């Protein structure tokens, strides 16, 4: 830990101080029955990740009998990463700017674009493409 002292004259001094936290922080992972059977009481802060396949009735009550400073309780089955999609799918969806703009307007406004708006967008995009080709 660092102690910073700011003097009235603007001088700054720092001093490193030894620091040991009162409690360790760790994660416990396993089936509830196995964690309870371990019976190693601890005052540490713990996050508990249960690997039980089904739901349990009030597992936190049982855990806190052994680990009174237990914090978050999650199930491993709920910690699966989100599905990632291929970049090629995104690229194909973005290949048509007219389609992207149409979907965006429908999403934002809750209704599709009018025929006049579609014509204006197509005209503007084609003019931009011509300007890019000339540049």
Image (spheres, rainbow, N blue to C red):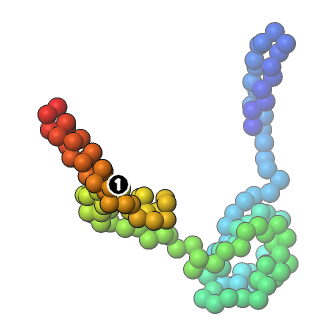
User: In the rendered image, which residue does mark 1 sit on?
Assistant: 117
**Viewer-side residue, 77 vs 89:** 89
Residue furthest front in the image: 116
| x and y percentages locating residue 66 in the rendered image | 82, 76
Q: Say whether residue 62 is left or right of residue 84.
A: right
What residue is drawn where x is 85% and y is 70%? 68
Q: Quadrant of the N terminus?
A: top right
What residue is drawn where x is 35% and y is 54%? 117
| x and y percentages locating residue 122 in the rendered image | 26, 52
Q: Say whether residue 50 is left or right of residue 23.
A: left
User: Residue 57's quadrant in the figure?
Assistant: bottom right
Secondary structure category for the residue under label 1: helix
From this view, report whether residue 58 is shown above or below residue 66.
Answer: below
Q: Is residue 5 visible?
A: yes
Residue furthest top in the image: 9
Give the total of numbered labels: 1
| x and y percentages locating residue 130 in the rendered image | 17, 40
Residue furthest left in the image: 134
Q: Residues within 10 Å of mark 1 (few under 14, many from 20)?
A: few
What residue is drawn where x is 17% and y is 31%? 135
From this view, report whether residue 97 is shown above or below residue 58.
Answer: above
**Viewer-side residue, 121 vs 35:** 121
Q: Is residue 91 visible?
A: no
What residue is drawn where x is 21% and y is 46%? 126
**Viewer-side residue, 22 vs 81:** 81
């Amino acid at each position: 830990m660092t102690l910073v002292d700011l003097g009235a004259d603007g001088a700054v001094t720092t001093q490193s101080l030894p620091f040991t936290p009162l409690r360790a922080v760790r994660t416990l992972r396993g089936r509830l029955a196995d964690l309870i059977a371990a019976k190693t009481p601890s005052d540490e802060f713990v996050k508990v990740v249960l690997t039980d396949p089904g739901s349990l009735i009030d597992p936190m009550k049982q855990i806190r009998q052994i680990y009174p400073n237990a914090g978050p309780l999650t199930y491993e089955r709920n910690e699966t990463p989100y599905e990632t999609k291929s970049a090629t799918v995104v690229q194909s969806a973005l290949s048509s700017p007219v389609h992207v703009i149409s979907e965006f307007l429908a999403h934002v406004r809750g209704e599709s674009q009018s025929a006049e708006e579609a014509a204006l967008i197509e005209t503007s995009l084609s003019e931009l493409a011509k300007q890019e080709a000339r540049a």
